[in-house]
Image (cartoon, rainbow, N blue to C red):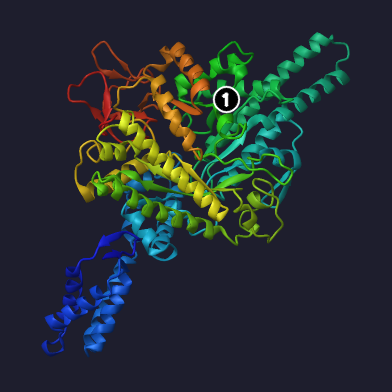
């Protein structure tokens, strides 16, 4: 017989555990009131005599209470009930005190390092984090089913953003910025009309971004194609003014003056976006998590204006933003996603100059990321659109007129599954693996349905900027949002961590080798088939999503190491490999890595991103351009990584030099204290303390081995 525990896991029936539980209650009774060994055996025989294949642990406990009373042991039954009740209280105990105190003392690293856009030392951020700990506690003890909470605690799955589950808000979205600019919007009860110039449009965009960020917990994306119209409006305004006031000028002179004014307006508008985003603080104490989508659509009537806007965005990102020391640094936001298409894929296209600038910008500032329009159209019914701020992708969806729509849609929430833990428990037994895999996928589905049900019945008044004034919809006051939760309009994302490790556990080899590749693809396809099945059965937009959650890679690995000990090439590393990615220690070139991972991106259509790490990027522009050409033809979504040196004395984030005395030295402030320099990598997001390697060679290494 098997026993179904409260967290949904299935274990073999163990009569010794029943003896122990009854024994603890028995020990509190006087001798005359105690149950005998024979009576305990009778209870066990009754349970086992049912010959059930499976029983709920609660049903077993009910039988014990019932049989104790039948035997006349009423006091003992009462004591057993109290024992059972106390155990339930322990499971539901409030645990916020320690978590909150550790936040205040700046020692809660799990929470403090979870989000790159949160300064956990700032009072405003701490206020939000403290509220989040209370919310997580209520979610764990009361709001979520016990088996989901237990599965989260045990690292079976990760219920993302539990600190916001108590509120009827969602994850990420694609803002319908075109509708909000063209038709106006309302913020704080004030009407914002359609802008009449480019700079005003840029200001309105940043106001919308701030308002949206305050009422959701994930990222947001803005397609800058909608700004081209307003740059042309500005040009026409300047031309009209000059025609009216400077009729004595030649056409060439007027054009030169207009071009100069447009350059100033363009620079100021883009600067407004960049500086506003980086100086705004939302109500949860963080900078808005924003992605700008840089796409030149060949059918766009404002393509020339948008080319100018993209060029200025890239120029300003390349320059960086000055910190408090006056040093130009790389801002975390807005993130940039640049689309490669026929006219800008570095094969002689008209807009190749923009891609050359993008590569130069990536070499210095790590952004933009790259999307291949060619490969994306193959997966998404001919469409090209932005990922949401969290890098998840929406499924194609048509409105009542048969037109595809992506902007104004959103993600309801994310739950990620721990693949390596399944492999550890399966111990190489494939039958056991697939059985346990399905059980845990079902748990993930239930957890995602909790996200969905939490949003049902939400009224538009909860966030007018989203539901009433255009960011997502234009519903009436008091109208519920339910119609936007069904029929695939919004998504529910199943994330996954550790395909490399589970493949190694089950096959003994990496997913890049023969039988490893076959197994890894089966695992991926199985998850995709499950999400498709859930979608058909429920009418909800379930999707498979390669979770870009670096901190989760460490959380799962830490939990499993505590549970199962050190396992070579699995828990011994201190991290799990993110989603489907090839392990960072494998000797694989950039082209082979992208070509290999492309097959997983097609399956993980609800969200995917691949990366390669290139040393000395600023001295490798030709190589990077070659990789960009390869991206266009071979993989949908990719980024470059490298190590990024950082001086804590002055804020310099360029390359740290080795001076003539073979010492590390900041070229800006000449600091030589290596303890005040960090090396960070986008590969995993590690931001901890760094140290010299054992040989004190010309490299500062992070504590995590794979760095």
Residue 258 pos. (x, y %): 76, 17
Q: How many marks?
A: 1
For residue 137, side relative to residue 310 (left or right): left
For residue 399, side relative to residue 506 (left or right): right
What element does badge 1 sit on?
A: helix
Q: Residue at x 65, y 28 (%)?
A: 269
Q: Is residue 319 above or below residue 143?
A: above
For residue 605, side relative to residue 224 (left or right): left
Return the residue at label 1.
Answer: 374
The answer to whether residue 262 is visible is yes
Q: Nearer the viewer, residue 94 or 635?
A: 635
The answer to whether residue 100 is visible is no
Residue 502 pos. (x, y %): 30, 40
Residue 558 pos. (x, y %): 27, 45
Residue 579 occupies quadrant: top left
Residue 195 pos. (x, y %): 74, 36
Q: Residue at x 68, y 52 (%)?
A: 468
* Badge 1: residue crowd in 10 Å (few <14, some 14–19, many ≥20): many
- Check the picture and name the quadrant holding the C terminus: top left
Q: Nearer the viewer, residue 44 or 558?
A: 44
Q: Is residue 535 above or below residue 553?
A: below
Q: Nearer the viewer, residue 151 or 674?
A: 151
Residue 90 occupies quadrant: bottom left
- Check the picture and name the quadrant holding the N terminus: bottom left
């Amino acid at each position: 017989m098997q026993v179904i525990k409260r967290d949904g896991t299935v274990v073999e029936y163990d009569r010794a555990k029943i003896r122990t539980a009854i024994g603890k209650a028995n020990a509190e009774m006087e001798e005359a009131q105690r149950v005998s060994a024979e009576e305990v055996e009778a209870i066990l025989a009754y349970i086992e005599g049912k010959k059930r294949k499976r029983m709920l642990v609660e049903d077993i406990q009910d039988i014990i209470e019932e049989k104790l009373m039948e035997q006349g042991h009423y006091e003992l039954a009462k004591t057993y009930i109290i024992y059972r009740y106390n155990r339930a209280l322990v499971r539901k105990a409030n645990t916020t005190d320690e978590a909150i105190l550790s936040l205040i003392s700046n020692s809660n690293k799990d929470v403090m390092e979870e989000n790159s856009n949160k300064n956990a030392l700032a009072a405003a951020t701490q206020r939000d984090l403290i509220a989040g700990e209370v919310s997580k506690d209520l979610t764990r003890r009361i709001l979520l089913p016990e088996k989901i909470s237990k599965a989260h605690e045990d690292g079976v799955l990760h219920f993302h953003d539990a600190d916001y589950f108590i509120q009827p808000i969602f994850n990420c979205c694609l803002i319908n910025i075109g509708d909000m600019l063209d038709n106006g919007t309302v913020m704080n009860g004030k009407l914002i009309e359609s802008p009449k110039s480019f700079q005003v449009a840029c200001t309105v965009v940043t106001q919308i971004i701030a308002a949206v960020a305050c009422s959701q917990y994930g990222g947001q994306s803005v397609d800058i194609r909608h700004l081209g119209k307003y740059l042309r409006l500005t040009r026409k305004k300047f031309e009209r003014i000059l025609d009216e006031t400077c009729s004595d000028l030649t056409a060439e002179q007027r054009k030169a003056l207009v071009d100069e004014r447009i350059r100033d307006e363009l620079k100021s508008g883009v600067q407004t976006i960049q500086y506003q985003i980086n100086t705004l603080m939302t109500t949860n104490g963080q900078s808005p998590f924003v992605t700008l989508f840089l796409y030149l659509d060949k059918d766009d009537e404002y393509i020339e204006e948008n080319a100018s806007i993209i060029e200025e965005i890239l120029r300003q990102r390349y320059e960086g933003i000055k910190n408090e020391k006056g040093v130009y640094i790389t801002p975390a936001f807005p993130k940039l996603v640049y689309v490669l298409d026929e006219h800008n894929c570095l094969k002689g296209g008209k807009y190749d100059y923009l891609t050359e600038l993008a590569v130069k910008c990536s070499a210095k500032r790590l952004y933009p990321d790259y999307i291949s329009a060619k490969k994306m159209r193959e997966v998404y019914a001919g469409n090209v659109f932005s990922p949401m701020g969290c890098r998840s992708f929406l499924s194609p969806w048509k409105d009542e007129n048969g037109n595809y729509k992506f902007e104004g849609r959103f993600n309801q929430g994310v739950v990620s599954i721990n693949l390596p833990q399944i492999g550890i428990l399966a111990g190489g037994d494939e039958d056991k693996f697939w059985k346990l895999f399905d059980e845990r996928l079902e748990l993930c589905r239930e957890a995602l349905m909790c996200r969905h049900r939490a949003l049902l019945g939400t009224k538009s008044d909860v966030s007018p900027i989203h539901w009433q004034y255009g960011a997502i919809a234009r519903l009436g006051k008091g109208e519920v949002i339910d119609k936007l939760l069904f029929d695939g309009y919004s998504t529910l994302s199943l994330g996954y961590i550790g395909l490399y490790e589970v493949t190694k556990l089950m096959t003994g080899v990496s997913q890049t080798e023969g039988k490893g590749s076959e197994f890894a693809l089966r695992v991926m396809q199985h998850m995709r088939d499950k999400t498709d099945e859930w979608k058909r059965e429920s009418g909800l937009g379930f999707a498979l999503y390669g979770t870009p959650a670096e901190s989760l890679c460490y959380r799962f690995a830490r939990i499993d190491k505590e549970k199962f000990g050190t396992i070579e090439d699995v828990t011994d590393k201190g991290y799990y490999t993110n989603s489907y990615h090839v392990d960072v220690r494998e000797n694989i070139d950039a082209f082979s890595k992208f070509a290999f991972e492309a097959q997983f991106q097609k399956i993980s259509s609800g969200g995917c991103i691949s990366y390669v790490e290139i040393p000395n990027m600023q001295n490798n522009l030709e190589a990077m351009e070659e990789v960009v050409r390869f991206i266009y033809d071979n993989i949908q979504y990719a980024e470059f990584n490298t190590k990024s040196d950082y001086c804590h004395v002055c804020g310099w984030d360029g390359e740290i030099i080795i001076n003539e005395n073979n010492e590390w030295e900041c070229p800006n402030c000449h600091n030589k204290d290596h303890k005040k320099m960090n090396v960070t990598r986008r590969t995993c997001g590690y931001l901890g303390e760094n140290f010299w390697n054992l040989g004190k060679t010309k490299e500062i290494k992070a504590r995590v081995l794979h760095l």
